[in-house]
Amino acid sequence: MLKREFSELTGFYPTDVMYMAIENAYMAYNGSKRDFCRDFRDNKDGMAEAIAERADRSHASVMEKAGLLMKETEELKKRLERELEWRPYEYEGDVKESEYQAIARSPGVKKLPVSEARKRVAEECGFAEGSVIVISETNRAERNRHGQIRPAGKFCREPLWGSTDENYIRFDASGRSYELYNGDLRIV
């Protein structure tokens, strides 16, 4: 019997879990679908209550199993993370975080506002000031023992300036990304 047929004959619209219990009871029932639906509707000999109770137990069992599976999945994810041995990774060619921090700690180096950083890039590198977009962060990454790389957050990389040979500005211009680092212009 289809769920739609059952609902038409009883006026009862069961959940999927409840209908599974109804279907199991119907398969064990000796009689026609009309008789079954009438007996269910009338709760003959407590039939509807017994089916509802079985459905509740079944639902509780499914939820318990789902909870256990979710817990097991989380444990497996943790084990996989340990197995893959993810470690911090910095992209080749980019200024390393330790180098950026060394400049930031240098005496006389100050953080630049974006407008001043754009002006410095234009003066030092020859880009049109209006085409310079200052980027104040860079991607962190991790690499596993198989060489796979994944994103792992961001590094704050505010523009820094002490002199023409002690500076850091990350920026985009003319469709490319650059780092101005201690007077050297790098494509990243």
Image: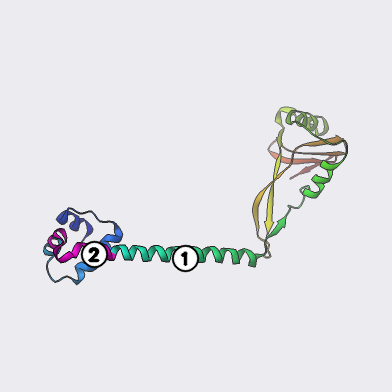
Q: Nearer the viewer, residue 49 or 147?
A: 49
Q: Is residue 106 magenta?
A: no
What residue sits 80% from the left and 37% below the top? 160
Give the quarter of the image for residue 5.
Answer: bottom left
Q: Which residue is mark 2?
A: 51
How far across and how far down the image is residue 71, in percent?
Answer: 50, 64
Q: Is residue 123 left or right of residue 34?
A: right
**Crowd rating for badge 1 (residues with CA inside 10 Å; few <14, some 14–19, many 20+):** few
**Crowd rating for badge 2 (residues with CA inside 10 Å; few <14, some 14–19, many 20+):** many
Q: Nearer the viewer, residue 121 or 53?
A: 53
* Predominant SS of the magenta segment: helix
Give SS at disc 1. helix
Q: Is residue 48 magenta?
A: yes
Q: Is residue 17 left or right of residue 36?
A: right
Q: Is residue 22 visible?
A: no
Q: Which span is picked out in magenta?
A: 38-54
Check disc 1 and give the amino acid type: Leu
How far across and how far down the image is residue 155, in percent?
Answer: 71, 46
Q: Quadrant of the N terminus?
A: bottom left
